[in-house]
Amino acid sequence: MAGPSAIARQLDRCDICGRKVHKKDLVRTNIDALAVGGSNYLIESSYGTSWTIATASDAGAISSGPYADVMRVSIDDSNNTTEVFGSQTWSGSGVLRSNTAIDASTWTSLVFVADMGPYDRETSPEISFKIGLCDSDGSNKEQYGLWLVNSSTRAWFTFDIADTPVSKSSNALYFYITATAVGKKWWVDRMQVIKDATHIRDNAFIPTTGTAVDRVDTPIMLTRKVCDRHREELLSKSERYGRIAEQRSDEPIAVDIQEV
């Protein structure tokens, strides 16, 4: 039988080099990092009160979506299983649209982007997702993208504000996603509107939960667990500031009689 010391010898990885070492040999160290700037002018990046669904029926937050590390399977006393903490899922064809206007009248362009996919992997037929602009009530749709999806996909379109159609107003834009999914379940998550962008490349995803976000690159401090190759040794009090023999200040300048 393994003793307590053997049970405690669990393996883990160094966050820097990825080397597997015993967990007891890892230490935590602070590092300076840079939180990448970006924007998301949708006030909710996941389904909530700022979004409206039509036609499709609510299937619950049962899809793993882009957050497979969060979604769990719950088992009750009767051994019935239920997916929890997943992405909001709908059954059947439907239209998901924003119901909170975005004022983009001073922008040059924008990118609308969202993760989407089927609840189960679908190959025949694929689920069709149309994305674009619409009016506040979901009418007068202007399609700017068509995506045929059989697994999780990040779909997007670019829109130049100067090309705003006469049926729309750049100071009150609404976005929609239409899913053609007869007899199928589907989900949408990680929705984002990026200001003055022309591509999703180099634009970090910015989650929002009630307020739009527009931030610059921001210095932050993180904590990593590291192995002995990447740890920084702590100094004793006598060594903390270094022990040096050099003079730390300049010697006074002597006053000499000047020659004339």
Image (cartoon, rainbow, N blue to C red):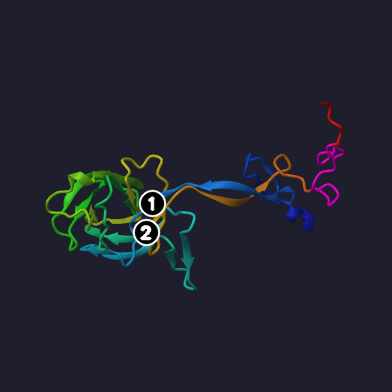
**Disc 2 element:** loop
Taking the image as drawn, is residue 151 in sight?
no
Residues tagged 2 and 1 counted as in contact (Cβ below 8 A): yes
Does 69 appear in magenta?
no
Q: Position of residue 95 (x, y in %)?
A: 22, 58
Q: Position of residue 245 (x, y in %)?
A: 87, 38
Q: Earlier in the sequence, mark 2 or mark 1?
A: 1
| Magenta segment, prevailing SS (helix, strand or loop) | loop
Residue at image mark 2: 212
Who is closer to the viewer here, 118 or 242? 242
Looking at the image, residue 153 sits to the left or right of residue 2; the answer is: left
Instruction: Please give the name of the residue rendered at 47% of the width and 61% of the height, measured from the top-left corner.
Output: 72
Q: Position of residue 183 (x, y in %)?
A: 24, 57
Who is closer to the viewer here, 215 or 16? 215
Badge 2 local density, few (<14 within 10 Å), some, or many (20+)? some
Magenta span of residues: 235-253
Instruction: Please give the name of the residue rendered at 33% of the width and 60% of the height, measured from the top-left corner.
Output: 89
Residue at image mark 1: 39
Does 244 appear in magenta?
yes
Looking at the image, residue 84 sits to the left or right of residue 110; the answer is: right
Measure how far apart labels 2 and 1 are at the Cα level. Answer: 8 Å
Taking the image as drawn, is residue 216 in sight?
yes
